[in-house]
Structure formats: C-alpha cells, structure tokens
Amino acid sequence: MTDRRTVILAGLGALTALPFLQRFTATPALAAGPTKFEYTLTDAQWRAKLPGLSYDVLRHEATERPFTSPLNDEHRAGTFACKGCGVPLFSSTTKFDSGTGWPSFYAPLKNAVGTTTDRSLMMERTEVHCRRCGGHLGHVFDDGPKPTGLRYCMNGAALTFTPAKA
C-alpha cells in the first residue's frame, strides 16, 4: 500500500532528476545558439561519423564516467585533438593527473578552444568547446596547478591522441 509520504518522496525524486534527464533530450546550447563554426555537419552526419559516447559527449554535452577513458592514462609526448574535427587542442606537456578520473590539462593550445557558461545541474560552470566545430569537450575549473591555476577537465571520448614523432 502506498502512503502519502512515499508519493511525496517519489515526486521530489522525479523533480530532482528532471535537469539530468533534460540534458539528454534538449538541444545542446551550442547547436541551438547563433554561434557559427567553421566545421559543421548535420546531426545525421555527426551520428554517422562519431561512435556513440563520442557523439553524446561532443554533440549533446554528455559526460563519460570517470576513470573509463584510456586517455586518462596516456603519458606519452604528443597532441590531443578534437575527435569531431581533428583540430589540435592540448599538448601532452600541459597534461597532469588531477585525480578526478578525466584527462586534465592546465592550458589549451593557442586558439584551440572556446568557452560558454553552463548553468545546468543547478550550478554555474565554464564549459569548454572546440573552437572549430563547437563540440563539447568538458569544463574548466580554477583549481589546477601552476603556471595557470586552471584545470581543463576533458572527456576522453571527445579527444584523440597522436604521439609525437621520434
């Protein structure tokens, strides 16, 4: 038998889950906004080009589970690029272990990324996106190491890695 307390708690739980569910059904802010990017594809073309999780992250601002990306443990010299359009984003020289479970960097390459304000999840964060295709990469926080004090917390599913030539 269902009592009033159970119904109220279920309702509150549903309301709490709404922002999370909306994130996977709403049009991404970058796709809906007036920003024009130099590399564009239709949603169907993006879906055909990118594997499932990469598509969800880059085009619909999803987040991969922490400690699941092989790029989190990538320590060779090289360059991390956008999985959507291939533009170089981060040098391995700026990568560090943040302990968060996502590849983290203290600085992007020059003219590689853009940022927008992300007000989802009932907080305000700075979202990082590829400057060329607008793909969602992750977020930047002000708790990183010197020299910048920034932590670019990126989704490995949004990146590719190319080792430096010997």
Image: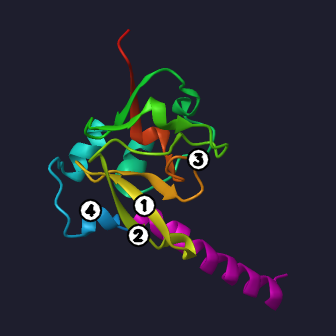
**Position of the N terminus by quadrant:** bottom right
Callout 2: SS: strand
Q: Amino acid at mark 4?
A: Ala
Q: Amino acid at mark 2?
A: Thr
Q: Which residues are magenta?
A: 1-25
Which label belongs to residue 31?
Answer: 4
Q: Residue at x 34, y 37 (%)?
A: 83
Is residue 135 left or right of 37 when viewed as pictured? right
User: Mainly helix, strand or loop, the magenta region?
Assistant: helix
Circles 2 and 1, Cβ within 8 Å, touching? The answer is yes
Characterize the local packing of mark 4: few (<14), some (14-19) or many (20 or more) Cα atoms within 10 angstroms: some
Q: CA distance from mark 3 to mark 4?
A: 32 Å
Residue 21 among those drawn in magenta:
yes
x, y percent for residue 81: 34, 35
**What residue did someone put label 3 on?**
145
Callout 4: SS: helix
**What residue did someone put label 2 on?**
117
Q: Residue at x 57, y 37 (%)?
A: 96
x, y percent for residue 76: 50, 20
Sequence-wise, which precedes: disc 2 or disc 3?
2
